[in-house]
């Protein structure tokens, strides 16, 4: 990869970030109502995407256990408790041999 | 402790930063052999996107030319448009300030900023300032973690043993952030639907895994009504 290609890709990346955050006008009320409903689904989708590999398989057992531990404590609506649940799940998964 | 004190922001984002550092190290070690030291460091300095940079590495190692590299950048960066659109109404700063902050828009910082906004609303304090402060601090920390990780990797320090542990941070983090973002029953239903849809897309079209969460979120957010 040349420095030119790297520069183009960096520009595309920053442009995509700045476009909606700084350059485009603020969305209308109806569109903002839709956007306001998106954070939870985005995070749930991101969590799911991190559990699937590029080979159409699930990640290793301890990571699944960690996700399960976090999920079990998610009703507490506390990031700290979710991290604790994840750590406990990971430890259990590792002890159980994955 | 205030919900948006520097200490609380650090406590929230440091686990993710540690994981980012580990992945930065893996990236640096892998990229050095393919791109050379200067371009490897420059890529992390200028792009700051783990998903994109690893995808570029995979393409480069397969002998890709300029066009596929640019195309993958366009496709994987599409999600920034949605993340930015969600965050835009929550930021109060000037256009110039938002343009400067935009560099730090990655999945993790987006999550921390939105969660800080929800926490501020619950505490009855203005959300805009909390969101901007959290976005900036978490952005700088995650960026530094990515840069330092890349540098460590380039220097040849191996952290492969902790890769699996680091890999567990992200699903746990995003589950926690999802739980913070759920303020109504309908949010939980939409989150569950998005998770299932993302899994379906990721299994059916693994190359679009990076875009799947945003596509799924858009689809489940469109139907109206809140309960």
Image (cartoon, rainbow, N blue to C red):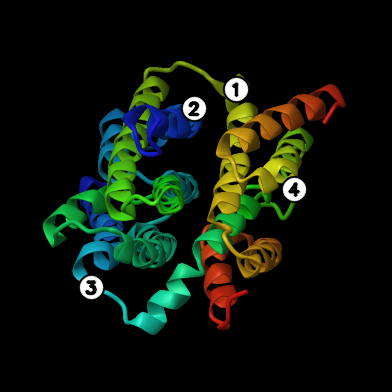
- Secondary structure under tag 1 reads helix
Classed neighbour count for the residue bearing mark 3: other residues with Cα under 10 Å, few (<14), some (14–19), many (≥20): some
Spatial distance from mark 1 to mark 2, Cα to Cα? 7 Å
- Residue at the image point whose x is 38% and y is 57% from the top: B69
Q: Please, which residue is most extreme toward the front here?
A: B124
Q: Choose the circle earlier in sequence order: 1 or 2.
A: 2
Looking at the image, which is closer to me, B50 or B184? B184
Work out whether disc 3 and disc 4 sit on a shared chain.
yes
Spatial distance from mark 3 to mark 4, Cα to Cα? 38 Å
Work out whether disc 1 and disc 2 sit on a shared chain.
yes
Spatial distance from mark 3 to mark 2, Cα to Cα? 35 Å
Q: Chain of mark 1?
A: B
Spatial distance from mark 4 to mark 2, Cα to Cα? 21 Å
Left or right of residue A11: residue B77: right
Are dots 3 and 2 in contact, CB under 8 Å? no
Q: Which mark is residue A24?
A: 3
Q: Choose the circle earlier in sequence order: 3 or 4.
A: 3
Labels 3, 4: front one: 3
Left or right of residue B11: residue A19: left
Mark 1 lies on residue: B162
Mark 4 lies on residue: A58
Spatial distance from mark 1 to mark 4, Cα to Cα? 19 Å
């Amino acid at each position: 990869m040349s420095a030119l290609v790297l520069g183009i890709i960096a520009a595309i990346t920053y442009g995509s970030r700045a476009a909606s955050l700084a350059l485009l006008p603020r969305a209308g009320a109806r569109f903002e109502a839709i956007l306001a409903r998106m954070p939870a689904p985005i995070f749930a989708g991101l969590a799911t995407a991190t559990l699937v590999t590029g080979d159409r398989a699930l990640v290793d057992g301890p990571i699944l256990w960690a996700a399960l531990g976090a999920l079990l404590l998610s009703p507490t609506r506390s990031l700290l408790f979710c991290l604790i649940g994840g750590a406990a799940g990971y430890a259990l998964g590792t002890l159980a041999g994955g | 402790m205030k919900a948006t004190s520097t200490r609380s922001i650090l406590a929230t984002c440091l686990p993710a930063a540690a994981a980012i550092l580990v992945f930065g190290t893996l990236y640096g070690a892998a990229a050095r052999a393919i791109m050379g030291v200067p371009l490897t460091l420059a890529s992390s300095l200028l792009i700051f996107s783990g998903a994109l940079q690893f995808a570029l590495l995979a393409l480069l190692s397969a002998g890709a030319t300029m066009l596929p590299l640019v195309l993958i950048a366009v496709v994987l960066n599409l999600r920034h448009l949605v993340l930015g659109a969600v965050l835009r109404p929550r930021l109060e700063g000037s256009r110039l300030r938002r343009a400067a902050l935009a560099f730090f828009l990655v999945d993790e910082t987006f999550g921390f900023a939105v969660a800080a906004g929800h926490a501020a609303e619950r505490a009855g304090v203005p959300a805009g300032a909390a969101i901007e402060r959290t976005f900036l601090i978490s952005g700088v920390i995650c960026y530094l973690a990515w840069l330092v990780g890349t540098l460590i990797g380039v220097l040849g320090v191996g952290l492969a043993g902790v890769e699996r542990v680091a890999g567990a941070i992200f699903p746990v983090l995003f589950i926690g952030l999802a739980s913070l973002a759920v303020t109504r029953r309908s949010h939980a239903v939409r989150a569950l639907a998005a998770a299932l849809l993302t899994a379906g897309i990721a299994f059916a079209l693994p190359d679009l895994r990076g875009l799947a969460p945003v596509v799924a979120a858009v689809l489940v957010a469109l139907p109206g009504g809140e309960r």
